[in-house]
Image (cartoon, coloured by chain):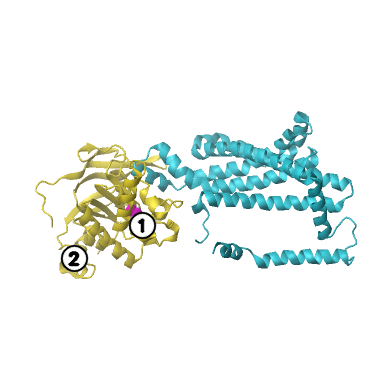
Amino acid sequence: MKVLAEPDFVFECRSASVTLPLNGGARPIISDINLDVREAEFLSIVGPSGTGKTTLVRMLGGLLRPTAGEVRVKGEILNGPPEGVVIVFQDYANALLQWRTVAANVAFGIERKLSSKECAARVSAALDLVGLSKRADDYPWQLSGGMQQRVQIARALALRPAVMLMDEPFAALDAMTKAGLQDELLRLRDQTQTSFVFITHDIEEAVYLGDRVAVLKGSPGRIDEIVRVELPSPRDQISTRQMPEFLAYRYGLHKAIGHG
Amino acid sequence: MASQAWSSRINWAGLSVCALMLLVWEASVRLKFIAFEFFPAPSSILSGAVRLAREGILLEDLSHTLLSIAMGWTIAMVIGVSIGLLLGFSPVARKFGLASVEVLRPMPGIAFAPLGLLLFGFSLQTELVVTVLPAIWPVMINTMGGIANVHPRLTDVGRTLRLSPTEIVRHLLLPAALPSIVVGARISLGLALVMAIVAEIVGNPAGLGYGIVREQQAMNPDLMFAYIAVVGVLGIILNAGVLALTTALWPASSRVAA
């Protein structure tokens, strides 16, 4: 575990709520969210479906305004998508530009801001990080699902973000691809010192990846509990997952969510 | 490599059926299985086409029809794409405008030929009235649908990557709608060809369509069929041309296995 002398918060939510207009009425989706995200922290948020996980990520990413309370990014009140924060969406096929090559997709977020030379350098660095350098000239539809999601992650990394918000990014992938990408994310965090907010409905994934795991529960969704995960780093798909501590966290979170 | 890929893309089996049909046709006429004096053999149609080409009249008619298709299609594209974009982007425009589109769309363009004749007489303008009106709809509807059906996630992507609203339209929504717009443009082009020929048959005495009527009235069935064949070949070439242009400009919009 990293020990931070004085924790720098990248995100601070103070009683943030989001109410969306639905069928003529107003439906509260998430309510009274108090949550901090620290620098280079991996924060997992776990919760059953219908608890507003996606709404929470969209609020943090500036796509939705909190209808009550406040959200601060590096001290500033959130107002639209903030610089240095980027969302990676669950449905990679919709989120990629099908008419652009892999490299051009990765360049999409930076090409209007940087010189072409700097842009090319960042694109190849990002593709290296996700192991897709050899597929730079392919189109997204020529790649497997796992590779497409890596393209989306590379596009986010090319921005050199301070925070990556990931909305169930591996939900549509098979178990083996998922395990590989989980380890890639942890490696990326160590290499780039990016903070991750990682939404999932998979408790084991939340524990395996997270420095902390927040439990979102109820309707409207509230943060029910935040668990600090004290597992040794680097984590390992086989040995970490069979540690008694891992199983204890898993058990505790299942209890907290209300299973068994 | 390239020529090999090209020859493997030709549908030899399909073409051989066409050749066989021509052969049967030729044989039936020569062996007098078909005893209909206005039904010439393919060989005499071909020699008729050669004769028309030598006299220069075929080129003249062809250029007139091509000009009228090009003008009609261009006008239809400009109107269709602009109104289609407006309808695609603005729910308000859809709310107020879509009913009018649905009322006007089923009207056959040829029904406006008499109006064109009243306004412009036997002229290219009359031909354009008949060509433009029906050719507007396919590209308009496909442009509108292309824009309105872009997945909302792409807008989310644009926002999280901090693009401005204009950049989102230009770099995400328009390119995403492009394949659908191209499909509409192709259908419109095919329609423009058909309507130009119809207009030349019933209205403006010029071009390939008039050539068909002229040779019919002059009792030259071989020349009449030669004109019909040229119209058919023109349709194939125009469609292939738009496809080739699209593939050259936007390789990713044609998803043939690479």
Residue under the point 38% across and 37% down: B164
Residue under the point 36% across and 51% down: A106
Q: Please, is residue B81 above or below residue A192 in the view? A: above
Q: Where does residue B60 sit, x and y in percent of width and height? A: 76, 42
Between circles 2 and 1, the one closer to the viewer is 1
| First reached walking from the N terminus: tag 2 or tag 1 | 1
- Which residue has dot 1 on it? A149
Residue under the point 14% across and 60% down: A230
Q: To which quarter of the image does residue A138 belong?
A: bottom left
Q: Please, is residue A200 above or below residue B157 in the view? A: below
Classify mark 1: residues with Cα within 10 Å, few (<14), some (14-19) or many (20+): many
Residue B154 located left or right of residue B100:
left
Q: Where does residue A134 sit, x and y in percent of width and height? A: 37, 61
Q: Please, is residue B132 above or below residue B7 in the view? A: above
Residue under the point 15% across and 45% down: A8
Q: Where does residue A229 sit, x and y in percent of width and height? A: 16, 59
Q: Label 1: chain?
A: A
Q: Magenta stretch? A: A148-154
The answer to whether residue A203 is magenta is no
Q: Where does residue B132 sit, x and y in percent of width and height? A: 67, 38
Task: Give the chain letter for cyan.
Answer: B
Q: Is residue A188 visible?
A: yes
Residue B94 located left or right of residue B118:
left
- Which residue has dot 2 on it? A246
Task: Give the chain letter for yellow.
Answer: A
